[in-house]
Image (spheres, grey):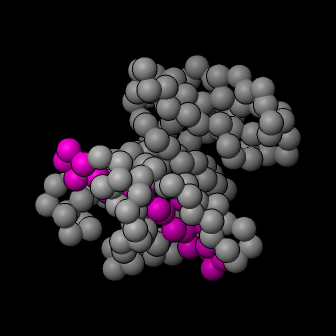
Amino acid sequence: VFRVATNFYGLLVTDFASTNLVYATSTNIAGPYSPVPAISSRNLTQSSAIEMGGSFRVFGSGIFAYEFDPATGVLGTNIPSLGLSAFQIGKTNGICADPSVIRLADGRYRMYFKYAAPGATAPQHQLWQITSADASGTSWDTNTVSYITNGSVPGAVRNGQNILLYF
C-alpha cells in the first residue's frame, strides 16, 4: 500500500493464479480497494512502488523498474539501467527478485531483494541490499551491494532514522 495523494491510496498485489500484477485504489488506507484494469495484464510479480522525484516507479522481480501512473494504473517505460542480475552480486546463476525500495534520509534509495539459487527453498534464499548512486534512483551503486541474512521476500519501511526490514 502506498499514498498517491491526500486521501488516495494504491495497492499492488500479485495474482498468483495468473502471475499478473494487479493494481487497486481506495480513498481510505484501510480500503475497500477497487481494481484498476489497465495494469492487470502485465506479467510482473512481487512488486514495490515508490515516488521518486515527482513520479512513481514500480519495481518488480527480475529486478526491473517501470514508470507508473497511479491515477490510471498504467505502467510506462521500462528503466533499463536498473536490471540486477545474480552475476552482479557474485553468483553464477539464480534470480534476484522481490524488491522492496525505501528512500533514505540523505535522499538516496535503498533496495532490499531476494537472491534464490536454482532449486533453492525459501529457507535457503538470501536477502541482499543495494543503494542508489544518487537521489534520482535511476542508477544503483553496485559497490554497495551486500548480503544481509538468509530469508525470503523482504519488505522494508523507514520510520524516521530506523529501517524496519521484515521477511
- The mark tally for this picture is 0
Whether residue 39 is visible: no
Of 48 and 120, nearer the camera is: 120
Q: Residue at x 51, y 75 (%)?
A: 134
Q: Residue at x 20, y 69 (%)?
A: 90
Q: Is residue 128 magenta?
A: no
Which residue lies most toward the left here? 92
Of 8 and 123, nearer the camera is: 123
Q: Residue at x 19, y 64 (%)?
A: 91
41 versus 140 height, above or below: above
Find residue 58 and report its horizontal and vertical position in percent: 52, 46
Find residue 165 and report its horizontal and vertical position in percent: 57, 63
Of 70 and 158, nearer the camera is: 158
Find residue 44 and report its horizontal and vertical position in percent: 42, 35
Whether residue 128 is visible: yes
The answer to whether residue 30 is left or right of residue 61 is right
In the image, the segment drawn in magenta is: 101-120
Q: Quadrant of the N terminus?
A: top right
The answer to whether residue 45 is left or right of residue 95 is right
69 versus 112 height, above or below: above
Which residue lies most toward the front here? 123
The answer to whether residue 40 is left or right of residue 87 is right
Q: Is residue 115 magenta?
A: yes
Rendered image quadrant of residue 13: top right
Rendered image quadrant of residue 68: top right
32 versus 155 height, above or below: above
Find residue 124 and report its horizontal and vertical position in percent: 30, 55
The answer to whether residue 140 is left or right of residue 27 is left
